[in-house]
Image: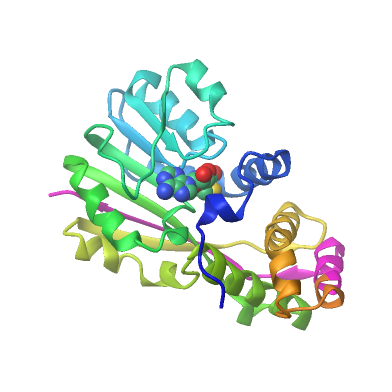
Amino acid sequence: MSQAIGWNNFVDTTALPEYRRLRLLEELFDPFSLRQLDCVGIQPGWQCLEIGAGAGSIAERLAELAGPANVVATDLNLTFLDPIADLGVTVLHHDVTVDEAPGRFDLIHTRFVLDHLPEREAVIRKLASWLKPGGWLMLEIGTTLPALSSHPANQRSMTVLADVMAERVGTAPEWARTLPVPLEEAGLTDCAAEGMIMPARGGGPLAHWLKCTTKLVEEHAVATGMITRDELAEAYANYDQPSFVDYTWMTVAARGRRV
Ligand SMILES: C[S@@+](CC[C@H](N)C(=O)[O-])C[C@H]1O[C@@H](n2cnc3c(N)ncnc32)[C@H](O)[C@@H]1O
């Protein structure tokens, strides 16, 4: 088995295809994220931290709610974050696994980041310590559900996606399903979690995103014999077929508050 090298070594996070994949991710998942953020009632003046901000849409929304000067957005790759820096958001190159707190916060939000970090439980404890008393930590984590697939080729491709991510990135595809317990174990209170599953309709945006995401693991999966190009071609063809529908991706949002 090959060694995990982390998300930013496995994926070319500065490339245009990754920017397009992130923008599609935002289009698909922002509505759920914004409903979750509504639950905590962000007020003007709240100090907010967005970790692993990606292409920046959530940090931009936090800036609208709290005021741009009150928002810090971090990532290991700042290539796509100039527009939110121009709004007045503080954009930092910052590794959440090793770097110091970039402030004290009323809200810390992060989406599809901790799932890829093997040290996720330690990171949660660290983030909890960066909250002001009463401040909220909100995590959004993805999980693959290949067993729910409607087609054997897509069941295989989703299984392989999860397996390669686990092996090469260090992702824990099933960890989302333990939430909100890790938040409780970090000493947070008022913990809650909610899972959201959308249909991936052939030809639709979620199917396209799953296809783009599977392509990230294609070379490694084929080279190591985990799946054949023909099997992948069949899964991709289904993702383009309007009669196809699948429920194989769940996002879990979990939140907890510092006492
Ligand atoms: C799957 S993308 C999600 C982007 C964004 N959170 C979203 O949901 O739109 C993961 C992001 O986390 C960033 N990232 C990965 N490891 C990180 C770390 N240790 N510290 C901060 N950001 C990290 C990546 O550069 C990438 O932008």
Q: Residue 84 at what x, y percent from top left?
A: 51, 24
**Outermost residue, front side:** 2
Identify the image quadrant of residue 200: bottom right
Does residue 35 appear in the picture of this structure?
no
Marks counted in the figure total 0
Seen from the viewer's position, the closer of residues 197 and 96 is 96
Q: On the picture, is 136 further left or further right than 193?
A: left
In-image side of 208 versus 241 (left or right) = left
Instruction: Confirm whether the magenta stretch covers residue 95.
Output: no
Residue 162 location in percent, x, y?
Answer: 58, 71
Q: Position of residue 214 (x, y in %)?
A: 70, 63
Residue visible at 36% across and 27% down in the picture: 71
Q: Which residues are magenta?
A: 233-259
Tell me which residue sits at (46%, 38%) in the image: 75
Q: Is residue 88 visible?
A: yes
250 and 91: which is toward the camera: 91
In this rendering, the answer to whether 195 lies above or below 158 is above
Work out whether 254 lies above or below 12. below
Q: Residue at x 32, y 42 (%)?
A: 108
The residue positioned 73% from the left and 65% from the top of the image is 218
Q: Estimate the x, y position of residue 63 in percent, counting from the top left.
A: 42, 25
Residue 241 among magenta residues: yes
Picture quarter with the N terminus: bottom right
